[in-house]
Image (tube, rainbow, N blue to C red):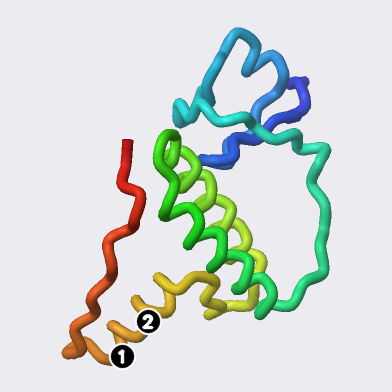
Amino acid sequence: MSDPKTIRCLTCRSEFSDDEVHGHNACPSCGSPGVPMSIAGDITVRINVHELRILTMWATGYASHLRNGGDDARAALRSVIRELGKQCPPGTLLTLNEEIAQLQEHFPDVEVHRPEPSGGEG
């Protein structure tokens, strides 16, 4: 019998046993250096979709301004938002980017200009 999975990568959502991550300083699956989460910390939260949209839009806006380490943080945030989306009713849009993409599908002739994130990379 295999060891129970105790750790989940925040970026790729792969799950590992303690033995599988022993000696690793990054996710064995995707290489993310981020701190993994304990599966024992999984909970169920009751929240309205409107509240969830507010949180994801604010988090996405904040993440767009991150500098050093921002790429890893944005990848982790995208992973969290994808996971939240899986738990929402079909068709739920959690980010402004999803809303803009949907508008572009319905109105392909409308040109959308997105501002460059401030703060840059590096």
Say which element carries label 1: helix
| Foreground pick, 107 / 18 | 107
34 w.r.t. 108: above or below: above
Q: Residue tagged by mark 2?
A: 102
- Place of residue 38 in the rendered image (x, y in percent of width and height, measured from the top left): 75, 34
What's the residue at 56%, 78% (across, down)?
92
Residue with the mark numbered 1: 106
**Marks 2 and 1, how far apart at CA:** 6 Å
Is the residue under label 1 in contact with that under label 2 (CB below 8 Å)? yes
Q: Nearer the viewer, residue 31 or 96?
A: 96
Quarter of the C terminus within the rendering: top left
Check disc 1 and give the amino acid type: His
What amino acid type should be assigned to the residue bearing mark 2?
Gln
Label 2 SS? helix
Q: Quadrant of residue 83?
A: bottom right
- Occupied quadrant, residue 89: bottom right
